[in-house]
Structure formats: C-alpha cells, structure tokens
Image (spheres, rainbow, N blue to C red):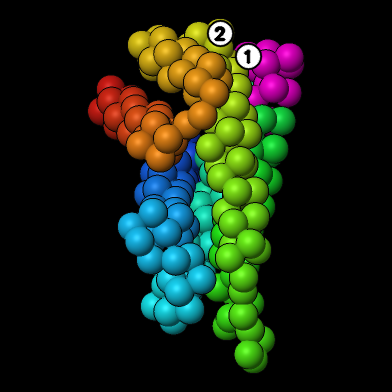
Amino acid sequence: MTQGRFVQSFRSVKSAAIAGVIYSILATAALLLLRGLPAAGESGTTPTAWIEDPVNQAALIVGLNLASISSVAFLWFVAVIRKRMGDKEDKFFSIVFLGSALVYIGIWLVAAASIASIAVAYQRFDNASVSTESVTFLLGFSEALILVVGPRLQGVFILSTSTLILRTEMLPKWLAYLGYAAGLVLTVIPMISQPVGLGFPLWVLVVSVTILIAKSKQNDNE
C-alpha cells in the first residue's frame, strides 16, 4: 500500500466507525473503573482505606489511561465524520459540532485525572497520604464534571450531529431522530446517574455500527 493510500484509508468512513467503536468500549470501561472509588465509600469502606489498596490504585490508573486513549479515538471519529460532510457541511452546526466535542473531551480528561490523581500520588511519592476531606473534594469536583457539566456537552454534540445527519443525509434519518431524543435527555435532566451517563458511549457505538453497515451495503452494491 502506497503512503497516499495508507493515509486515505485512515481518513475513510470505515476508520471513523472503528474509532467510534473503540471510543465506546474504552470510555465505558474507564467510567466504570473510575467510579469505583465513590462506590466503595457507599458500601461501608472509607475512601481513604479504599485508595490505600494497591489494586484499587492500579484500577484508577488503568481507568485514566483508558480515558486518555478513548479521547484520541473520539477525536478521530469526529475528524473523519466532519471531513465526510464535505461541501454539504453547515457552517453553524459544524462549529457547534466540533466545539462541543473538543470541550467535552477536555471535561472528560480533567474529571478522569481528578479521580486518578489520588492513585498517582500514592504511586509517585513516598509516604503519600490523603485525608477524607481531600478525597471528598476531588470526588465532588469530578462528579460535577461527569454527572452535570459533561452530559450537557454530550447532549449538544448529539443534537448538532443529528441535525447535520438530516441536512447532509449521510446516515439514515431514524438515527437523527434517535439522537434528538438522547440529546434532549442528556441536556434537560439536571443530574445524570451512571446508567444514563453510559448513554453517550452507547449512542456513539450505534452511530459507528450504522456507518459500518451502510459502508458494507455500499460495497455490495458496487
């Protein structure tokens, strides 16, 4: 494969779908791992005792790494989708689409780093210790980003993407209507619980699988 074809393959619709699938899987795994700390506190184990366990520290660090990799996959997904719009791109909604994606990624990474920073401190510094107050602050800060701020950006991204799908007709209309429903839920609900919070990676997964199916049908017709 020549260099030109190699680059072109990574800019293809199929690469966007694969990136979307990778994001969905890694983001879901990262969220479940990073939310382990508050769950431990609710089950009777104090957060400080939980974080002192090396196994739990490793889980948080793995979650942070998965969050970082998922962010790269999501940006690839967004970049290829935007490129495929081409001349049909609506400038207004395209800016909202790209802007909400970038801001969301920033929020997602800051939240993940806030939670995992406690584990990183234990791994990097000798005689590290953490107080209940500091753990409570970091958890509250990260929860505010993941459960309140993040879903608003997810909702805006889904709504703008759904509008672009309708205007460019690059994907089935039912996907846009599904996106409007999901986007409104994420935008309107004041506090997002973890099960509902997993809706965004699931929506990206549905979009990615739809792209792969559409691409497969197109190849069969050709």
| In-front residue for pair 16/136 | 136
Instruction: Answer few, some or many: residues within 10 Å of disc 2's Cα (few below 14, many 20 plus, some between 14 and 19).
Output: some
**Which residue type carries mark 2?**
Arg
Residue 215 coordinates in the image, percent (x, y): 36, 30
Q: Which residue is drawn at the image coordinates 40% and 40% (left, top)?
A: 194
The quadrant of the rendering that contains the C terminus is top left
User: Which region shows up in magenta?
Assistant: 87-98
Q: Residue at x 52, y 56 (%)?
A: 67
Instruction: State the SS at label 2.
Output: helix
Whether label 2 touches label 1, CB < 8 Å? yes
Answer with left or right where residue 208 lies relative to residue 192. left
**Pointer 1: residues within 10 angstroms few (<14), some, or many (20+)?**
few
Q: Which mark is residue 88?
A: 1
Identify the main secondary structure in magenta: helix
Sequence-first tag of 2 and 1: 1
What secondary structure is marked by label 1?
A: helix
Residue tagged by mark 2?
167
Q: Quadrant of residue 182?
A: top left
Q: Residue at x 64, y 91 (%)?
A: 126
Q: Which mark is residue 210?
A: none
